[in-house]
Amino acid sequence: MQETLAYSLPGAADALPRPDPLAALLADLNRDRPPLARLRHDATIAFGPAMRVERFVLGNGLKVLVLVDPSAPVICLQTWFGVGSRHERIGKTGIAHLFEHLMFGETESVAHGAFDRMLEEAGAETNAATFLDWTYYHTNLPKDALELTLRLEAERMARLVLRDPQVSSEKEVVANERRQRVEDDVDGAVSELLYKEAFRKHAYGWPTIGWMEDIKGFTTEDCVEFYRTYYAPNNAALVLVGDVALDQALRGVQDHYGAQEPSRLPVEDVCPEPPQTEERRAEVTKPTATHKVAIGYRSPALGDFDHAPLVLLNEILFAGRSSRVHRALVQEQEIASEVRGWVGSFRDPALYDIYLSARGEHTGEELLAALEPLLEAVRRAPVTEAELDRAKARVELSVLQGLETVAGKAEQIGFYETVLGDPAALFERLAAYRRTTVGDLLRVARRYLVSSARTVIHVIPDGSSDDDDDAGAESEEAS
């Protein structure tokens, strides 16, 4: 997918090679710049059949990925940091997510609350997200607000104010978020328990939001250490997609990021998860109207050859009302009100999550018993070519729809650059989906849908909920 910028060899009539426009641009941009602010062109990378991502690297290690798309006078700017909950350590879980909150606070030259206000006044909108492998900050903006956005983003990367009042305030915000999204939410609590039981060594076993005792125990010193370590240009990728004037954008990057020093990034110390040889089960009582069951089968890493076939197998099993599991459990047997499955898209091997919600008085054991023949069927015999073709079409349509906006393109570029080191890996995945065979699905079904390597969480109603889970049965589809 990656290629260096090249030109055709001169013919007999051409005595001189064609000039390299990027070389001339960089020579102009780098004139009189200090070493940390000097840009080099790293690669030109095909992004689909018609577009190109130009990847530059600043002297301090900041990667700058630019895709010019002048179809509308807007730009999406995203900053992806190579840090997520997997980079934390026991006793300090949740600090990556805490920083997502802290980064919208005060900096040395921007007062608390002014970051969002200044961008909103310029017509921009901002957001952020943290997960297991990454953290990113997202801004959609009109093209004339690029200089302001670069200045503000660079300011908070290098000059965030971290004092006790700011840290204490955001700790309380995150603690409340944990109460609402995990402790008082059935799905959130069950998902957290599933990963905790499935991962005994690997950092994927603790939640991105962190354990409550860790959130409450963070000190300002912890935050300063984390910030100085991971919020550095050599741990970041700046993604610019849209109506970008390349020379102006790169000059703005040099002006605002070029004085920042790189950090000394620690060697990542994540323990591989040992093979699971016995089924693990846990049971919890929750305020829910019906029984539920969550199942975690082992799944391959995002970059693994088996990942794309397993995604397609999940489409056949769980995606939509015509899927095998929905037809069997919801429509025919009428024992479930909701069924869904999702294959984790992470740097390391993770889980293939399956979630079933019972209808009426049916139990989780009934759901498991009804699911097993459906899984055995795809382990025993190939799916049909027609099923595979429909799954491929659904997945490809979903991928391409996600690229309709500049924000969608930027997110895919940043995600794949951060997780796999290739900003155009999405198109490699499309090719992988297209070449997948029914034999590939048979192989992954037999390799990953193994009962002895799964984790099962049963959710038992505590009798306090009057919710009617059946009410939404007809509209439920897999995510």
Image: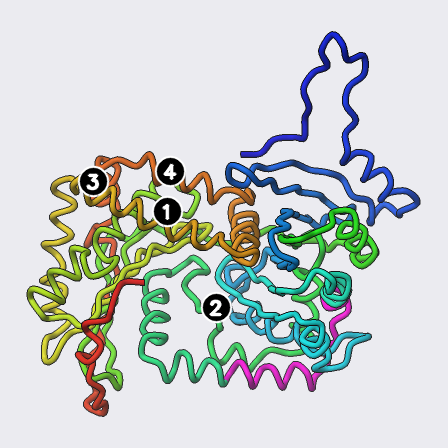
- Residue lying at 19% horizontally and 73% vertically, measured from the top left: 473
Crowd rating for badge 2 (residues with CA inside 10 Å; few <14, some 14–19, many 20+): many
Which of the two discs, 3 and 2, sits closer to the camera?
Answer: 3
Instruction: Give the distance between the C-alpha atoms of the residues marked 1 and 4, in whole angstroms.
Output: 11 Å
Instruction: Give the distance between the C-alpha atoms of the residues marked 4 and 2, in whole angstroms.
Output: 30 Å
Q: Earlier in the sequence, mark 4 or mark 2?
A: 2
Crowd rating for badge 4 (residues with CA inside 10 Å; few <14, some 14–19, many 20+): some
Q: Are marks 1 and 3 in contact (CB under 8 Å)?
A: no
| Above or below 389: residue 338 | below
At label 4, which amino acid type do we have? Ala
Q: Are marks 1 and 4 in contact (CB under 8 Å)?
A: no
At label 3, which amino acid type do we have? Leu
Q: Earlier in the sequence, mark 1 or mark 3?
A: 1
Instruction: Give the distance between the C-alpha atoms of the residues marked 1 and 3, in whole angstroms.
Output: 21 Å
Please identify the quarter of the rendering in which residue 350 is found: bottom left
Q: Which residue is mark 3?
A: 442
| Above or below 12: residue 388 | below
